[in-house]
Image (cartoon, grey):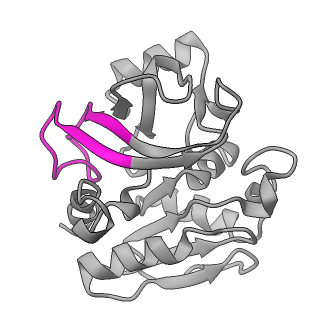
Amino acid sequence: MNSAVIVFPGSNCDRDMAVALETVSGNTPHMVWHGETDLPDNLDIIAIPGGFSYGDYLRSGAMAARSNIVDSILDAAAKGVKVLGVCNGFQILTEIGLLPGALMRNSQINFICKDAPLSVENNQNSFASGYEAGEQLVIPVAHHDGNYFADDATLDSLENGGQVVFRYRESINGSARNIAGIMNEDGNVLGMMPHPERAIDHKHGGVDGRRLFEALLS
């Protein structure tokens, strides 16, 4: 698997993401600085990691969305390259228009860092095919702006189109319909607030995120 991890000023999960990709695939990912204009050739997956790009100034992901590398990400996604955005990466995906909706301040106006119970809503895609439909997972979250919002028409479209991939099993941050992760209509772009890269080793507390990376490899 040929992969790339995009690194922004303030990224703090880029190494975690790289370790997860390398652990599962055996191949070292390309670490691509946001100021670059081109991505490596023949990528299978682009990962946009969590963290606080540009310190979350203005709006989470808003400044990162103006980075030089974004045009190449958009081009790659249009060609079918898989794109995974986690936490701040999910926020960036909404800011650059690859996913609908927005991530707002948590409903309790606090930073949430804990294990989150999830359910797999749709496993008929490249990201969740390693799980059973309806399977219950535990994957950690760590965010201040993870409250997913979209208007009712958009939410209905996501639900009807099978684009809701992961859902919280309890209210975590106020997200509409407890949405934890969604994909685009083509099924090659996934954004999720929980951190699967932090759940690939029993020594770190669990392995429920590992099968997501294994599914991408397969």
Picture quadrant of residue 38: bottom right
Residue in view at x 39 percent, y 52 percent: 188
Residue 45 shows in the view: yes
Q: Position of residue 93 (x, y in %)?
A: 60, 49
Please indicate whether residue 214 sits to the left or right of residue 55 in the image. Answer: left
Q: Residue at x 87, y 46 (%)?
A: 58
Q: Is residue 39 left or right of residue 186?
A: right
Q: Is residue 118 magenta?
A: yes
Q: Which residue appears at 25% of the width and 62% of the height?
A: 210
Percent x, y of residue 13: 55, 68
Q: Is residue 174 above or below residue 217?
A: above
Q: Do we see residue 193 in this rendering?
A: no
Main SS of residues in magenta = loop
Q: Nearer the viewer, residue 137 or 42?
A: 137
Q: How many marks?
A: 0
Seen as rendered, the residue at the extreme top is 152
Residue 37 location (% of width, % of height)? 71, 78
Q: Quadrant of the N terminus?
A: bottom left
Front residue of 85/68: it is 85
Determine if the magenta segment contains residue 141: no
| Image side of residue 174 versus residue 111, left or right | left
Quadrant for the C terminus in the image: bottom left
Q: Position of 41 compared to 90: left or right?
A: left
Magenta-highlighted residues: 116-139
In the rendered image, residue 26, in percent from the top left (x then y), is placed at: 26, 86
Q: Is residue 36 above or below residue 153?
A: below
Furthest-left residue in this view: 132
